[in-house]
Image (tube, rainbow, N blue to C red):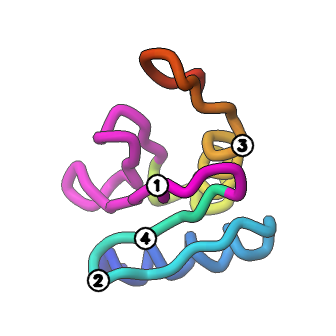
Amino acid sequence: MVEAEFLERLRCHLVERGVPADLRGEALLVHPSQSHLPVWVFVGYGGRFFSWQHAERRHPVTDIPGAADALAAYISSPVSLFGGSARP
């Protein structure tokens, strides 16, 4: 499966969870409800992982529902306004 197909399947799983996301070329743009800043998701590491947060966060492309759960949890975590992120 090519990267765009992985991202489209992830987008569908996110939408099922009520998380808005748009496919933008070779990336998925996820829109957190409590923030104006989107989260960009890419397929990387030789096509084996979804990655976000400057590639500090990742999840295997073989577990798309799990990746959608991880992203939904990530974007629902509060962002600190004082020097960094409160996100896990």
Residue type marked 3: Ser
* Residue closest to the far right: 17
Q: For the magenta stretch, what is the residue range?
A: 33-59
Residue type marked 1: Val
Q: Which image quarter is the N terminus in?
A: bottom left
Q: Which-is-in-front pick, marks 4 and 1?
A: 1
- The residue identified by callout 3 is 76
SS category of the residue bearing label 3:
helix
SS category of the residue bearing label 2:
loop
- The residue identified by callout 4 is 28
How far apart are labels 2 and 1 at the CA level? 15 Å
Mark 3 or 4 closer to N-term?
Answer: 4
Residue type marked 4: Leu
- The residue identified by callout 2 is 25
SS category of the residue bearing label 1:
strand
Residue type marked 2: Gly
- The residue identified by callout 1 is 39
Mark 3 or 2 closer to N-term?
Answer: 2
Front in this rendered view, residue 88 or 5: 88
How far apart are labels 1 and 3 at the CA level? 12 Å
How far apart are labels 4 and 1 at the CA level? 8 Å
Circles 3 and 4, Cβ within 8 Å, touching? The answer is: no
How far apart are labels 3 and 2 at the CA level? 25 Å
Front in this rendered view, residue 82 or 39: 82
61 drawn magenta: no
SS category of the residue bearing label 4:
strand
Categorize mark 2 by other alpha carbons within 10 Å: few (<14), some (14-19), many (20+).
few
* Residue closest to the far top: 83
Residue 8 image point, x, y percent: 50, 81
Front in this rendered view, residue 23 or 31: 31
Mark 1 or 3 closer to N-term?
Answer: 1
